[in-house]
Amino acid sequence: MFCRRLLALFVVAALLLFASASFSPSLDLSSLTPDPAQSAAAERLIHRLLPEEQAGKIEIKVDRRMSEENEGKDIAKIISDKEMVKVSGSSGATAAWAVGEYLKRECGCHISWDFRQLETIPEEWPETNLTLMANDKVRFYQV
């Protein structure tokens, strides 16, 4: 009887120890993909979605340090003039999100899973200086 209780206590202690180690609130969920590779992936996405003339006028730069400076939240900055849109983001996904927000807010365009409305995309970019920060540290898409 004593051995069974000792074994049960050991199992419970091991489970608690495993659970606290596996689900730590300080778990690092950042991407292992290097920043230049994330930038290139975001640029390829933009080239697939937008007409080539406009896609060639969007420059993407990923710098994961931006997130570290903002409580671990995803952040992106968009600076544009009539000729070029420069987007810097804390990840490639954040930079792509920022381009979508810029197109929606400044150009009246819409891109979603099911639909693309790009008729209002301008030949000259609207000038802006915009900073976007995600509300949460973790976001995901479910299809």
Image (cartoon, rainbow, N blue to C red):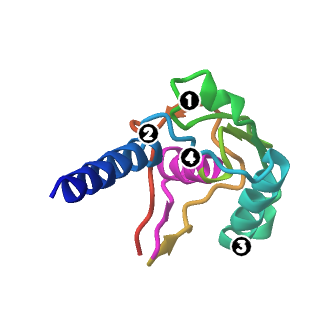
Q: Residues within 10 Å of mark 3 (few under 14, many from 20)?
A: few
Query: Which residues, given as a range, are shown in magenta?
Result: 94-113
Q: Earlier in the sequence, mark 2 or mark 1?
A: 2
Q: Nearer the viewer, mark 3 or mark 4?
A: 4
Residue 29's disc is 4
Q: Earlier in the sequence, mark 3 or mark 4?
A: 4
Residue 91 lies, in percent from the top left, at 66, 45
Q: Are marks 1 and 4 in contact (CB under 8 Å)?
A: no
* Residue positioned 71% across, 55% down in the render: 123
* Residue positioned 34% across, 52% down in the render: 15
Residue 109 lies, in percent from the top left, at 51, 59
Q: Nearer the viewer, mark 2 or mark 4?
A: 2
Q: Quadrant of the C terminus?
A: bottom left
Inter-mark Cα distance, 2 to 1: 30 Å
Which amino acid is tagged 3?
Arg
The answer to whether 98 is drawn above or below residue 88 in the figure is: below
Q: Earlier in the sequence, mark 3 or mark 2?
A: 2
Which amino acid is tagged 4?
Leu
Left or right: residue 86 versus residue 134 is right
Of residue 46 and residue 94, the one placed in the foreground of this image is 94
Residue 26 seen by the camera: yes
Inter-mark Cα distance, 2 to 4: 11 Å
Q: Residues within 10 Å of mark 4 (few under 14, many from 20)?
A: few
Which amino acid is tagged 2?
Ser
What residue does disc 2 label?
A: 24
Q: Earlier in the sequence, mark 1 or mark 4?
A: 4
Inter-mark Cα distance, 1 to 4: 23 Å
What residue does disc 3 label?
A: 48
Residue 131's disc is 1
